[in-house]
Amino acid sequence: MLNVIRMDLYRMLKSRYTYIVLAAAMLMMLASVFMSKQDVTYYQQTPSALETLRLNEEDTEVKWGIYIGHVSPEWCADAEIPLPELVSSNLQSHILLMFLVVFIVLFAGNENRTGFIKNIASQVRHRYELVIGKLLSTAIFTAVMLVMAVLVIMLGSEIFFGYVHIQDFGKFMAFLGIQFLLHIGYGSVILMFVYLFQNAVASLITGILIAAGILQVADAVLLNVVPAFNEIENFSIMNYLTSGNVALVSMASGNDIYLKAVIIVAITLVIMGCFSGTIMEKRDI
Amino acid sequence: MEYLLSTDCLTKKFKKQAAVDNITVHIGRGEIYGLIGKNGAGKTTFLKMICGLSTPTSGDISLFGYHGSERKKVISRIGTLIEAPGLYPDMSAYDNLKLKCICVGIRRKGYIQNILDIVGLGNVGKKKVGQFSLGMKQRLGIGMALVGEPDLLVLDEPINGLDPEGIAEVREILLRLNREKNLTMVISSHILEELSKIATNYAIIDEGRLIKELSCDELDAACSEHIEIRMEHPNLALPVLDALGFRDYKVVDENTIYIFERLDESGNITMELSKQGIYIQSISVTNESIEDYFLHLTGGVHHA
């Protein structure tokens, strides 16, 4: 088992995809901070637009999709924008989740696509070890990506806003920890798609569409089929998915939201891990 | 005789189609076992089952004396090159080998370089595998199969797509490994003349079924110059041949006798059989190539 993990980590370090995806993600983070700065300046100079933004912000429910350069009305006041808020808006926007999807499809899918799996599938005692290796690599990649994102956003804040304002450090760390878990949980879903579809394009499109909130279309169906769901306030299937919780969990979330997110991650990891492991064990290579 | 690998009625079905149908073979230690068959005959599926990459629908595989699920204990003693070599194109040959070394737990210094030297890639440096020629990739694929000191090498079409020089290089590598390390090999190919230069035993499969299992000597005999008599009931002719003093002959199928001696006496044989009232369809002196022999057995007219 340890050998498989070591092998995957070695490959992750040697693979150019790792660095390409990280670099692209960080460029996007920098661009996002720049766009936020542009928008803040615009809203500060255009009070009517700021008022519209305030009204929209009050009406808008959780944004389940992928977006870039989010601006909160509070940022347009004269006070400094806290770094944790800049980071959380970029994590909740699913941008990093999208890059994680790309990485997993390339990293895990490459083993099948190149046929390298034929060299190792019969060398391991149980093929599910290969799934665990990929999950751990995903976890390490996610951790590196999150740390780098925080550093790049910090850099962007310094460059574009001229300051780095850190507050609520403990809360920020807890938020990052939960987002880290949610990203790994979603990674396990993508890994399952990679093994199930054995097709990079299908896995990539499915992963990005789900990250973009496509499963919201199921809400109307579920509300019709199961009337009891109507009694749940603001029911959406997204509330119970890892991708949905990436958008839902914010710096302002309470402990109950955090706990629910952790439970969803645990259930997702177990179910997806079992699915992927079974596919690997049963499948002909 | 104790076999290193044997299969018993091995079958693999995809839906109702049998890709491998009741194949029973026996492979001894040190043999180079050639698996001959047309494209789509079931060679790759058969090899995948041996290597544990595919699960048989029915039948059993015995590997180093282990059967059924017990076979998992020893399956890592097989080195495989199935279909195209499985390599990461954006990594060097060294890194590709290193990945497999890490996976099987080998950390010996100089081990990877030694394998690169064995397969003739000792001086490729950090060149990415994506820039390798087909022959280099094939040799690296063999190198990958050698990681972990396997006792059995399973190679599926290892010379496919290689130029004559590449074929000769791969042949030399395989012969050297067999000679120096007493490595047992199962090699599939549809290039029969090439396979005949290294194999010690053969299995001919067609449409998923084993047509014939024979040794190198038996194949040589079948392909050497001989008198071929085709007739309805070969058994009737045997006493006549005995009476004429023929000893080196063989009934090869239900309508054919091969005689490997006194090749200029076909007239005499015809006359004696005629005297006994035994009707023959044809008698001729022939010299089949391995390919002709294969086509004769499989009844095929397609290229093998």
Image: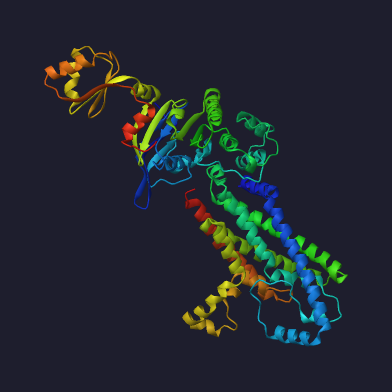
> In the picture, which quadrant includes the N terminus of chain B?
top left
Q: Nearer the viewer, residue A217 or B64?
A: A217
Q: Nearer the viewer, residue B53 or A23?
A: A23
- In the rendered view, tell whether residue B103 sits above or below residue B171: below
Asked whether, in this view, residue B6 is left or right of residue A127, the answer is left
Q: Residue at x 75, y 61 (%)?
A: A26
**Would you identify the image quadrant in which residue A136 lies?**
bottom right
Is residue B80 in view? Answer: yes
Residue A165 percent location from the top left of the image: 85, 71
Q: Residue at x 53, y 42 (%)?
A: B84
Q: Nearer the viewer, residue A240 or A59?
A: A59
- Give the colour scheme shown: rainbow
Q: Residue at x 43, y 43 (%)?
A: B45
Residue B139 percent location from the top left of the image: 58, 34
Asked whether, in this view, residue B133 is left or right of residue B123, the answer is left
Is residue A146 in view? Answer: no
- In the rendered view, tell whether residue A101 sits above or below residue A166: above
- In the rendered view, tell whether residue B44 sits above or below residue A169: above
Residue B29 percent location from the top left of the image: 46, 27
Instruction: Count the numbered circles shown.
Output: 0
Q: Residue furthest right?
A: A162
Asked whether, in this view, residue B236 is left or right of residue B13, the answer is left
Residue A270 percent location from the top left of the image: 56, 61
> In the picture, which quadrant includes the C terminus of chain B?
top left
